[in-house]
Image (tube, rainbow, N blue to C red):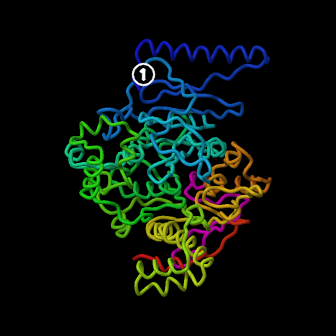
């Protein structure tokens, strides 16, 4: 972010105004206001906000130059220095994306959006001389939606457990995952993974700057859910990632989530087809279109085996045991499929099973029965859960367990929805069960966020204690690579031959991985 002298003066005046207001408030109340926290980072000095309990929050710190105009579809460039202090007291816009429906279980609220979106946020209770473990969130959203500033991802309560938390934005959709022959020539032989490059740039920023916030750059845990967890599993295979993170928490995602990644040639072909939709004959022409138009013409954006960020199919890297060896905390939810409505009857379900699985269809139908329409609907949700989420997570756990400690969970606790509530995906809401993403509010200590528009959950003191326990497991893992924490049920390490996991159900206890028979159907080599 570059500033003119005039803009620098405006920024400085804003900082002085905030300081004056704080001083006036302190004078009226008779207290001494804590000085605004400051940190010297790449580009200059940022000024954050300090809460009464000592938590410091820095929002909207740039970690790369704005990827606009000629920098669209370029690797993230270094931060442009600014003059004076940069207020870091509010979130930056999220990256351009389509909005989610307001009646969706995944609706996060409204945020401003922009193509200028490469910013991150830091929560810390530490002093600069401390060296607390760092947790960096890679948000989910199917490569097309989401942001590091979503209230559900707030790092304040995790930070109060003795870690420094970082959340970040990365380019999405056709602006983050787009390949084209001209881009490949421009990029010395590769194109397509700009969103992954942003994550790597943010991790390099963390390595260089997090000590300013009391964090330890030698103890970084990446955590994420859905495509965020998938991204982390891909970074474990990237030749550009060694030394940037040291532990992984993967929730309901993984490299096998959507099958093999496109090759660069396949992605380039799709990029040319997208350009033809708007009759753009050159890359220069394509860069003149608005970002929303680009996102609209690029279908199924996702990472690419580009030869630079990702040099092989991740299945090949994991199959050979050549991924980054590091402790892994991993798991999925009991009812992942309920957030993805299906309209299917017994005949359609059976027909799809026969077409998709051939001689194995009979075995699948014995595991996912569909003799009636109601049975077929229930089996379709279970099949979505196992095929799309649970089996990729299990495979990731099995392959990492050969080279590093692994801890696996199965989340089945159900949100206490308000009676009569319904959503786009399920009515009544109680039919969701432990849906895709249901664990996050507990694990991140953000239960109340889900009631900010209207009361949707009847949280109890038991829910809050449960959330505290999950945060304890997550932050203990970030501190020492082992989630076990005093006063909570023991969490055994995962062994493929035993498959003992932590069951995060109504109560927390150890048990065998549920649905093993169904998951064995999808067990890969």
Position of the C terminus by quadrant? bottom left
Region in magenta: 477-503
In the image, residue 269 above or below residue 18: below
Is 334 in the magenta? no
Mark 1: secondary structure: loop
Q: Position of residue 488 (x, y in %)?
A: 71, 61
Count of marks placed on residues: 1
In the image, residue 26 above or below residue 182: above
Is 501 in the magenta? yes
The picture quadrant where one finds residue 187 is top left
In the image, residue 314 above or below residue 14: below
Q: Position of residue 260 (x, y in %)?
A: 35, 65
Task: Pick the residue in front: 210 or 151.
Answer: 151
Task: Pick the residue in front: 463 or 241.
Answer: 463
**Disc 1 designates what residue?**
82
Task: Pick the residue in front: 447 or 277.
Answer: 277
């Amino acid at each position: 972010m570059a500033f003119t002298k005039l803009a620098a003066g405006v920024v400085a005046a804003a900082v002085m105004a905030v300081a004056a207001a704080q001083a006036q408030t302190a004078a009226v109340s008779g207290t001494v206001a804590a000085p605004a926290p400051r940190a010297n980072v790449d580009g200059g000095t940022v000024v954050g906000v300090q809460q009464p309990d000592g938590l410091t929050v820095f929002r909207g710190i740039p970690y790369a130059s704005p990827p606009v105009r000629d920098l669209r579809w370029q690797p993230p460039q270094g931060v442009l220095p600014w003059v004076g202090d940069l207020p870091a007291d509010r979130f930056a816009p999220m990256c351009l994306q389509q909005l989610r429906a307001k009646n969706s279980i995944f609706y996060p609220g409204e945020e401003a959006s922009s193509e200028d979106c490469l910013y991150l946020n830091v929560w810390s209770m530490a002093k600069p001389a401390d060296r607390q473990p760092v947790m960096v969130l890679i948000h989910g959203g199917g490569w097309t939606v989401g942001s590091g500033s979503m209230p559900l991802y707030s790092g304040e309560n995790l930070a109060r457990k003795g870690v420094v938390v970082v959340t970040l934005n990365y380019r999405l959709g056709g602006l983050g995952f787009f390949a084209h022959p001209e881009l490949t020539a421009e990029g010395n032989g590769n194109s397509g993974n700009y969103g992954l490059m942003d994550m790597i740039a943010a991790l390099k920023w963390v390595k260089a700057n997090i000590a300013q916030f009391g964090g330890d750059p030698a103890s970084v845990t990446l955590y994420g859910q859905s495509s965020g967890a998938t991204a982390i599993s891909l970074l474990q295979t990237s030749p550009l990632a060694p030394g940037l993170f040291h532990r992984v928490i993967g929730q309901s995602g993984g490299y096998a989530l959507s099958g093999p990644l496109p090759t660069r040639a396949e992605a380039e072909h799709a990029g040319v087809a997208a350009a033809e939709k708007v009759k753009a004959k050159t890359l220069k022409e394509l860069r003149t279109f608005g970002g929303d138009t680009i996102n609209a013409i690029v279908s199924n954006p996702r990472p690419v085996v580009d030869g630079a960020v990702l040099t092989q199919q991740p299945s090949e890297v994991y199959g050979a045991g050549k991924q980054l060896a590091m402790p892994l905390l991993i798991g999925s939810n009991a009812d992942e499929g309920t957030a993805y409505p299906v309209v299917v009857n017994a005949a359609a379900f059976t027909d799809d099973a026969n077409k998709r699985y051939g001689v194995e269809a009979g075995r699948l139908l014995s595991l996912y029965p569909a003799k009636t329409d109601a049975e077929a609907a229930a089996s379709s949700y279970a099949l979505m859960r196992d095929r799309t989420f649970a089996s990729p997570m299990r495979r990731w756990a099995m392959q990492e367990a050969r080279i590093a400690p692994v801890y696996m969970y199965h989340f089945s606790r159900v949100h206490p929805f308000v009676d009569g509530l319904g959503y786009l995906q399920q009515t009544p809401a109680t039919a969701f069960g432990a849906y895709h993403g249901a664990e996050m509010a507990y694990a991140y200590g953000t239960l109340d966020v889900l009631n900010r528009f209207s009361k949707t959950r009847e949280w109890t003191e038991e829910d809050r204690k449960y959330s505290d326990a999950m945060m304890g497991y997550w932050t203990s893992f970030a501190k020492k690579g082992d989630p076990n924490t005093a006063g909570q049920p023991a969490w055994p390490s995962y062994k493929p031959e035993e498959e003992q996991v932590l069951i995060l159900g109504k109560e927390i206890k150890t048990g065998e991985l549920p649905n093993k028979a169904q998951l064995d159907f999808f067990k890969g080599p």
